[in-house]
Amino acid sequence: MKRDSRLSSVLHALLHMHEADGPMTSETLAKCLGTNPVVVRRTMGLLRKTGIVTSDRGPAGGWRIAADLRTVTLRQLHAALGEPAFFAIGNRNETPECLVEQAVNAALDDTFIKAEALLLERFSQITLADLAADFSRRYAERRRQGA
Amino acid sequence: MKRDSRLSSVLHALLHMHEADGPMTSETLAKCLGTNPVVVRRTMGLLRKTGIVTSDRGPAGGWRIAADLRTVTLRQLHAALGEPAFFAIGNRNETPECLVEQAVNAALDDTFIKAEALLLERFSQITLADLAADFSRRYAERRRQGA
DNA sequence: TCTAATCGTAACTACATAAGTTACATGAAA
DNA sequence: TTTCATGTAACTTATGTAGTTACGATTAGA
């Protein structure tokens, strides 16, 4: 099963945009991510709808961050992407008549609901500013080691 | 992305086998699950490899549970199925050069590793006997309510 | 106004994987 | 020997992200 890597992609893109002076084009971002400009536009377009980024056409156009990094959480980004499913495992039938299957679903649902709550909770606590700070630490560390 | 429902399926099948007197055929199990006998054989075959069930060919053949329900956990069943991925979301690139992407991966990995640990922990605490008992409660409840 | 840069988007292909299906070989019981 | 049942290969279907091609729309600047 192919994994959805859009959250990873937009985080990567947003941090590069944060480091950049002006707007970044889909072309440039695509090179950073190792993908295609159309994929970038398609995915970033979802963030534009919620006001996290803006885009401008024409020469000197491109993508810019439109929000304070301290206020944008991973949870908001996940929501902006349409809240894709976290889990690759699920029930065979969500509303079964069979009592056996109801017992099975109850056990699995209980577990997955708790795991999803944990994920959402953590996602709501991590901001873009946190990631930017972590990048800065890694950058300083690499320079310190002369790499 | 299509969800893997094999764990749900084998749990459903195992509880029906537990309730049954003798062995159950792939045909019968397929009807319980609303699927195809070949799918049943393919999936149950994975459990046979780890000794959780046995199968016999010929007339009066079929599938039987070969383990004590109190000793079989959801974690063991997940392992028997080949430890399919829990998450439908992942990193774009698992071993990036880019420091930005490393920071992104670190944040996501930290969250997903903790969630996976929670899932495995809970799965290791739930046995087939627990599910069978829950089914019995539901069954008694339905009878009590005259349904 | 013309040109080039850039996004917006439709339409199609590629890919991965569980599930479903068909077909047939293998083996066991009566 | 017949029948029932599993074992398994091979193929199709379903689903959704990712990748690609193509082209229209918009904008800055000469």
Image (cartoon, coloured by chain):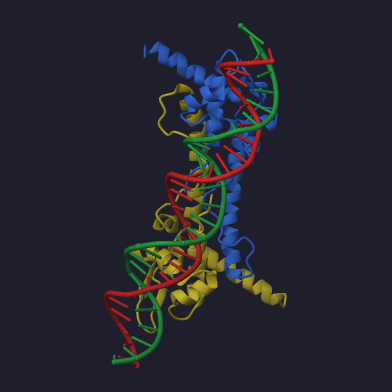
Chain colours: A blue, B yellow, C red, D green
Q: Is residue A71 above or below residue D18?
A: above
Residue drawn at x 47%, y 81% as measured from the top left: B21
Nearer to us in this view, A5 or A71 = A5
The image quadrant that residue D29 belongs to is top right
Residue A118 visible in the picture: yes
Q: Is residue A108 above or below residue B20?
A: above
Q: Return the residue nearer the eye: B72 or C26.
A: C26
| Residue B26 location (% of width, % of height) | 44, 74
Residue B91 visible at all: no
Image point 41% across, 74% down: which residue? B63
Q: Nearer the viewer, residue A82 or B14?
A: A82
In percent of width and height, residue A66 lies at 67, 22
Q: Residue B39: image x %, image y %?
A: 45, 66
Point 49% across, 77% down: residue: B28
* Relative vertical location of residue D3 with respect to residue A65 in this rendering, above or below: below
Among all residues in the image, which is located at the extreme right? B145
Which residue occupies the foreground of this view, B9 or C7?
A: C7
Q: Is residue B122 left or right of residue D23?
A: left
**Count of all numbered marks drawn on residues in the image:** 0
User: Which residue sits at x=42%, y=34%?
Assistant: B94
Expressed as whole percent of the image width and height from the top left, the position of residue A48 reads 67, 29
Q: Position of B50 compared to A140: left or right?
A: left
Quarter the C terminus of chain B occupies? bottom right
